[in-house]
Image: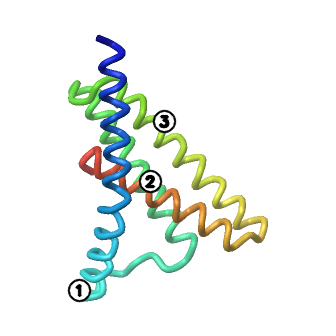
Amino acid sequence: MLNKLRELSVATFVAIMLIGTVAVPAGITGCTYLSEKFGVKQPETFEEQVALAQSGISAAQDKLKQKILNASISKNDASNVKEQLDNLVEGTGVAIELRAAGDVGGSQAKLDSAKGVLAVVRNYLGV
């Protein structure tokens, strides 16, 4: 029984990640259009992008805690999401370190990767 739950949880997470590879770019394109149309300021500098990512990670962590307390997420899924959020914290830290070391391209690529995963996780959690 436990193995079946693990397989289901992993399969669910993989499905979410695959959907994210299609839905996230479409969502980003839509958000960019709406923000330009209605004048919502987008983060421009690297530091603004990091701040937005960090606040998104914090919101996702809060939502995960809420779901755990409400028992609306399985232990396995919660563990997987927590691991992804921990990876995101580490990834944004690496991006900051790369930027401080002068690797502008590498830092932006790392941050962009983290932002993509964050969008998928936030979508999964309903943030």
Residue placed under numbered mark 2 in the picture = 117
To which quarter of the image does residue 52 belong?
Answer: bottom left
In the image, residue 67 lies at what x, y percent? 26, 33
Tell me which label, 2 or 1, sits earlier in the chain: 1
Give the vertical position of 13 relative to 101 (above or below): above
Q: Colour scheme of this structure image?
A: rainbow
Q: Nearer the viewer, mark 3 or mark 1?
A: 3
Marks 3/2: CA–CA distance: 12 Å
Q: Nearer the viewer, residue 50 or 103?
A: 103
In the image, residue 45 lies at what x, y percent? 55, 77
Tell me which label, 3 or 1, sits earlier in the chain: 1
Helix, strand or loop at label 1? It is helix
Residue placed under numbered mark 3 in the picture = 83
- Local crowd size for mark 3, using a 10 Å CA cut-off: few (<14), some (14–19), many (≥20): few
Q: Is residue 114 left or right of residue 4?
A: right
Residue placed under numbered mark 1 in the picture = 38
Q: Are marks 2 and 1 in contact (CB under 8 Å)?
A: no
Q: Residue at x 42, y 56 (%)?
A: 55
In the image, residue 65 lies at what x, y percent? 33, 33
Asked whether residue 59 is in view, the answer is no
Under mark 3, the amino acid is Glu
Quadrant location of the N terminus in the rendered image:
top left
Q: Nearer the viewer, mark 2 or mark 1?
A: 2
- Local crowd size for mark 2, using a 10 Å CA cut-off: few (<14), some (14–19), many (≥20): some
Marks 2/1: CA–CA distance: 26 Å
Q: Residue at x 32, y 79 (%)?
A: 32
Asked whether residue 28 is in view, the answer is yes
Marks 3/1: CA–CA distance: 36 Å
Tell me which label, 3 or 2, sits earlier in the chain: 3
Helix, strand or loop at label 3? It is helix
